[in-house]
Image (cartoon, rainbow, N blue to C red):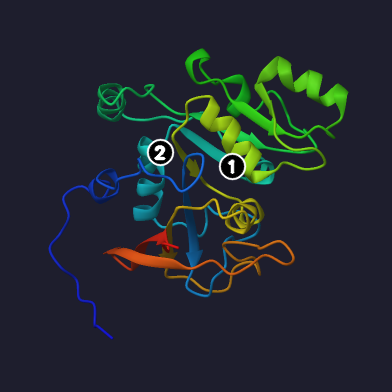
C-alpha cells in the first residue's frame, strides 16, 4: 500500500489526458467513459448530474471532449441534462484540425423509443459538419424513425435493442476512432458488459446523499470487469481518477 500525496501543480489539467495513446483499441474503436460520482457512489442529484459536479469537474468535462471523434450518450441523459452540440475553444479546434479531426465532435444519442423533442438544441443547433447521430434498432417505430431522419443521421445497430458492439462498429465504420461516452449509467453498464469500455475517467465529488443511482448499472448476468488505476489528480476537494481495462 502507498500513501498518495499532492504533487506539483499541473498547469493544464487536460494535458495528461491528451497524452494517452488511444490508437490501440481492443475492439472496433477506443471507448472512454467520463463520469462523475459522489463519494457515496451516487451519480445524480434529483435526477441530474449538474448539482453533483464541482467547478473543476465541470471545466474538465467540457474540455475532455477535445479527445473525441464523437460523443456518445444515452437518450435519458440527453433529455435530463438538456444537451447541446459540442463547443470547444478556438485553440482546441485548431489542435484537432492539426491531428486531422473535425473542429468539434458530433453527438451520438442512443435510443430505442426515439421519443425526443426535435426542437432541442442537440438536434436543431448542430452544425452541418457535426450533425447529431441517433443510434437505434430495427424494432424502433417506423414513423418515429422517419421523423428522426429529418433531424439527425440515423444509425441502426441491433434488432430488438441497441447492441453496443454493433453501435460501436457502425461508429468505427464512419471513421470515429475515439468514442467518448458520457453516460448514462445504464448505457455505460451495457458497454462494460459487452467488454467495450477501454478507459474510465471518474471524478469523485466531495458530496453524499444523492440519488440511489450508481455510476454504472450492469445488465443481469453481466460478468465483472477489471480495470487498472493509471492516474490520480486532485483539485480542491475533487478527485480525478483514470482507469484502463486490464489486459487479458
Point out the tag, 1 or 2, that comes first from the N-terminus.
2
Q: Which quadrant would the N terminus be assigned to in this image?
A: bottom left
Residue nearest the viewer, comparing 234 with 152: 152
Horizontal relation, residue 66 to residue 179: left or right: left
Check the image and report above or below for 91 versus 208: above
Check the image and report above or below for 9 versus 104: below
Q: Which mark is residue 73?
A: 1
The residue sitting at 59% across, 61% down in the picture is 216
Residue 29 screen position, x and y as percent: 48, 39
At label 1, counting other C-alpha atoms closer than 10 Å, the crowd grade (few under 14, some 14-19, many 20 or more) is many
Residue 200 screen position, x and y as percent: 44, 56
Q: Is residue 235 visible?
A: no
Residue sticking out furthest to the left = 8
Residue 19 screen position, x and y as percent: 24, 45
Residue nearest the viewer, comparing 68 with 60: 68
Horizontal relation, residue 5 to residue 35: left or right: left
Residue 172 screen position, x and y as percent: 52, 32
The residue sitting at 74% across, 65% down in the picture is 220
Q: Which residue is mark 2?
A: 65
Amino acid at each position: 500500500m502507498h500513501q498518495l500525496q499532492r504533487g506539483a501543480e499541473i498547469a493544464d489539467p487536460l494535458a495528461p489526458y491528451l497524452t494517452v495513446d488511444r490508437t490501440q483499441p481492443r475492439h472496433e474503436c477506443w471507448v472512454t467513459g467520463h463520469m462523475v460520482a459522489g463519494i457515496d457512489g451516487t451519480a445524480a442529484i434529483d435526477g441530474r448530474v449538474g448539482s453533483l459536479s464541482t467547478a473543476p469537474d465541470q471545466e474538465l468535462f467540457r474540455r475532455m471532449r477535445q479527445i473525441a471523434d464523437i460523443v456518445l450518450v444515452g437518450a435519458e441523459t440527453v433529455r435530463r441534462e438538456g444537451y447541446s452540440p459540442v463547443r470547444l475553444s478556438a485553440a482546441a479546434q485548431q489542435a484537432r484540425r492539426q491531428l486531422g479531426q473535425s473542429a468539434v465532435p458530433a453527438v451520438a444519442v442512443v435510443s430505442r423509443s426515439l421519443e425526443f423533442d426535435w426542437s432541442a438544441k442537440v438536434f436543431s443547433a448542430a452544425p452541418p459538419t457535426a450533425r447529431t447521430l441517433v443510434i437505434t434498432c430495427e424494432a424502433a417505430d417506423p414513423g418515429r424513425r422517419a421523423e428522426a431522419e429529418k433531424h439527425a443521421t440515423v444509425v441502426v445497430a441491433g434488432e430488438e435493442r441497441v447492441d453496443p458492439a454493433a453501435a460501436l462498429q457502425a461508429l468505427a465504420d464512419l471513421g470515429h476512432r475515439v468514442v467518448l461516452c458520457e453516460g448514462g449509467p445504464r448505457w455505460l453498464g451495457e458497454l462494460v458488459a459487452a467488454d467495450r469500455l477501454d478507459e474510465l475517467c471518474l471524478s469523485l465529488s466531495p458530496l453524499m446523499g444523492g440519488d440511489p443511482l450508481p455510476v454504472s448499472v450492469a445488465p443481469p448476468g453481466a460478468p465483472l470487469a477489471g480495470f487498472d488505476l493509471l492516474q490520480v489528480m486532485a483539485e480542491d476537494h475533487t478527485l480525478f481518477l483514470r482507469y484502463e481495462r486490464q489486459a487479458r
